[in-house]
Image (cartoon, rainbow, N blue to C red):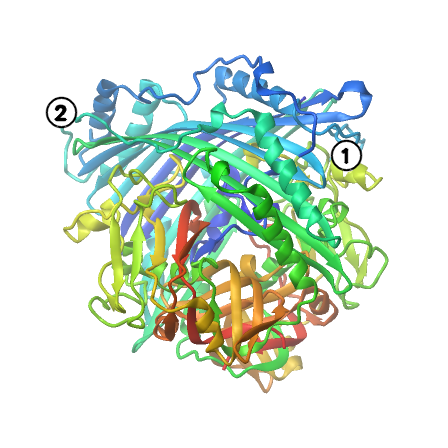
Amino acid sequence: MEVYVTRGSENEVRAYDGEVESLTSADSSGVGIRVLLDGTGGEGRRLGFAWAGSLDPAVVQDALGAARDNARYATPDPDVVLAEPDGVPSVEQDLWDDAVITVPMQDKIALALELERSTRSADPRVRQVSSADYSDSRVEVALASTTGIRSETRRTTAFVSVDAIAGEGADSQTGTGFSVGRSPATLHPDEAKADAVLRSTRLLGAQKARSARCTVVFDPRVVSTLLSVVGSALSGEAVVKGRSLFAGRIGESVASGDFTLTDDPTNSRAFSASSYDGEGLACRSNVLISDGMLRMFVYDTVSARRAQTRSTGSAVRGGFSGTPSAGCRALVLAPGTKSAEEILASVGEGLYVQSITGVHSGVNPVSGDFSVGAEGLMIRGGCLAEPVREVTVASTLQRMLQAVVAVGGDLRWLPGVAAGQTLAIADMQLSGD
Amino acid sequence: MSRGVARTGTSPERKYRAVSSSPTVSSTWAVRPEWGPCPAGGAPSEDELDTTITIPPVTDTSLIDGDVLQRVLSAALANGGDMAEVFAEDSATATAMLDDRRIEELSSGRSRGAGIRVVAGETTGFAHTSDLSEAGLLAAASAAASVARGRGGGGRTVAVALGPPAVHDRGARTLPGTVAKSTKLDLLVRADEAARAAGGSISQVQVGCGDSRRRVLVANSDGLLAENDQIRTRFNVMCVANGDTGMQTGYESLARTEGYEIFERYNVEDIARIAAGRALAKLSARAAPSGEVPIVLAGGSGGILFHEACGHGLEADHILKDASVYTGQMGKLVASPLVTLVDDGTVLGEWGNVAFDDEGHAPSRSVLIENGVLTDYMWDWLRARKEGRTSSGNGRRQSYQHLPMVRMTNTYLLAGRENADEIVAQTPSGVYVSKLGGGQVNTTTGDFVFGTTEAYLIEDGHLTEPLRDANLIGNGPEVLRRIDAVADDFDMTPGTCGKDGQSVPVGCGQATLRITGVTLGGTA
């Protein structure tokens, strides 16, 4: 049996038009219980799961009974086991800052109000700030099992974001800026403001572009999203179940030579860094693609057994209400040496994409088909030129990885499961007029 | 497929999602189902259960006593304020997943708690707790009340004259809790077998079913008291087909605000065959065209066009912040005269149906666009109050841990008079979309995308080659003006709509229609 318990609290302030629009404060906790039963006749084991959004003993007792009952219905399977300690030492990390608790709420409110005010007054073309948010959270997770697992992790996060609307005549464009940290003091609201203002104002006057095949340079925030999609196809679970475009390609060249992708939750600068994975094994640094060659997949305990290998400490779970699965937690692409400006100069002509839409509807990590909505600026003569909206960029993930022509040195640690830097990909289809 | 994408649990770890909060996102079932999949044989029958029940099941009794509600509401207004509200919830969910020919996971979940809201002027205070005792509720009320402090309103004792609860007949006949687990698993096994029998190229099948019972109580200091009992049931199949050109996926789902009686009307084998057929068809698909093309959307292909092209933009919270392309357009022509668009939370059984919204107000059938002219927006209590009107019953929230905001329910285009086959026959060249996936919109600019998951070329008025998946992109008002034909074959589909980090079930509906030009984001 395995028990996963979380306890946390959160605060959120939303500022609008000089006032606090909403103020939320809450504590929450919950438990997820996995029960493993021996199958009849020794043909395998069966797993059952239940969760509850409460640590009330009666509720937990009830969840335990439900998990035990659920196990009786699963298909007996010799590969279904709970994790066991594997001797890999964990990397201790300091992901907790008491300031999230000790900084008074009035200061957090002031942070949100000031972000809203300063964004509104930063540029005369900013005609609206639809919201400016401060939020923070602290979460503690404990995991214990009858197979000897004991792990505890805790982390704090603080976050500001601001949505600016720039206007000129009848034209309106939007830009979001944000900053993440472990406490209010580590945030950079000025960067969030500047980002929101730059992104919204530079799109003013954007038009549809002509359809063309061209090189596309992606902003670091977009690259973080792209890497997380690639990471989902590097899940050992997707591989063993025949749902990954990378299945059967270990040792092959799957990307251009300067593409080295690592999943490293042991680096505390990563937003989702952790000492332990979702089954209580030590997180470790896994090099997945090295100089373009596919080296390994990430596994949790069960998918590793199916693939006849060992867990890579890569179990992830969506809080107490989810069961573990194999996934990437802190992807980072080895930075190159060029700045964003140098990459634009080397590309010469193409499209710079500052944001994309429709990732969930247009990117398929099984087939590799890739088609997303995009907005950004044309690249002309090696510099950013006129703004573009209402276009798509398309290719396949397989071709895109092979067509990486530049990896930026401007690595940014971003929320989510991947860091990002400027990235240039050749030969993509731009669809517009 | 990333499990993280579709997750919207109530974990304290959810905060990082706030990053994507700027555009509203919806997905008609993201590729990865949110409720688990699962199956295989040999499960024991339900009557062998010996689970010790130590807390009451989600029952028909009131979640909180009336006198407790009055004291909590009074405490919430102790520092002043215009309105206080208690939203209590007790929900039980069950999911089962068959994957890779095995019943992998049965999951049971329980969530109980209350969110307390205090509105003082333009400011809302909100706190939630999983402790439904009077002490727990009073603590949350005190936290929510802190926003009213210093506003000079002063404490007032509220004698809340709560009326009798408005309790709605849930409409479900076969409650999920009364269905044996083995019966649910049998549905999964049947679907798995049907999908695999659909073609030798089907290499993987994932089948999920899930149900939830959500008891809700809303009480506020204006004397409103409403209780609601929502039953939802869903079933989904995802197939992978493997061929010379690589792998392709196909997906189909059924989701209703009803109980297990839906399986008397809907055949799980049919759902499985549709999903398998989509994956198989795409094995021989060519790349989708790139650039502007005429599009024919099949009836019931998703309806997500309207959800994205104008639905989100007609939500009053965006309107009042001047963050919608439809702000100031009331009474103006914003679409083709063929477009009459309705948001209707009263459609019994549909996925977006609500007996009451999550602020306790009755849903309505709102005509948003009539013959192309903008006639109304959608309203929750907070935004309606600012404009001195009443809520249209569109105040919804994911759970007691979330503040309500303006959300769609079932949003659909009224059917036209033309014949679907004739619309295709009268289209010399273009693309026919028989199934859409998700979409996303920037309400401020009106630019939106929506993805195809089954599409064909139209050549000389006939469907020819299948096409690989791609997104379409357009601008809401522009695309709506380009609708030049609407047929009479109306159908609805379920979806999950995400906005500002909260997911709620919605319905989308439309008949076959043609758009004279939309940009298709293919590679050919």
Q: Amino acid at mark 2?
A: Ala
Residue nearer the viewer, A187 or A127 = A127
The reply to whether residue A419 is in sight is: no
The reply to whether residue B461 is in sight is: yes
Q: Position of residue B294 (x, y in %)?
A: 48, 76
Q: Residue at x 47, y 63 (%)?
A: B298
Q: Is residue A241 above or below residue B307?
A: above
Q: Is residue A273 above or below residue A281?
A: below
> Label 2: few (<14), some or many (≥20) within 10 Å?
few
Q: Secondary structure at mark 2?
A: loop
Residue nearer the viewer, B311 or B277 = B277
Identify the mark at residue A89; answer none if there is no mark: 1
Tag 2 subunit: B
Name the side, left or right, on which B290 lies relative to B118: right
- Indicate the quadrant where residue A82 lies: top right
Q: Secondary structure at mark 1?
A: loop
Tag 1 subunit: A
Name the side, left or right, on which B357 lies relative to B190: left
Q: Amino acid at mark 1?
A: Pro
Residue nearer the viewer, B487 or A94 = B487
Q: Position of residue B182 (x, y in %)?
A: 60, 26
Q: Residue at x 67, y 33 (%)?
A: B103
> Label 1: few (<14), some or many (≥20) within 10 Å?
few
Q: Which residue is mark 2?
A: B159
Q: Quadrant of the C terminus of chain B?
A: bottom right
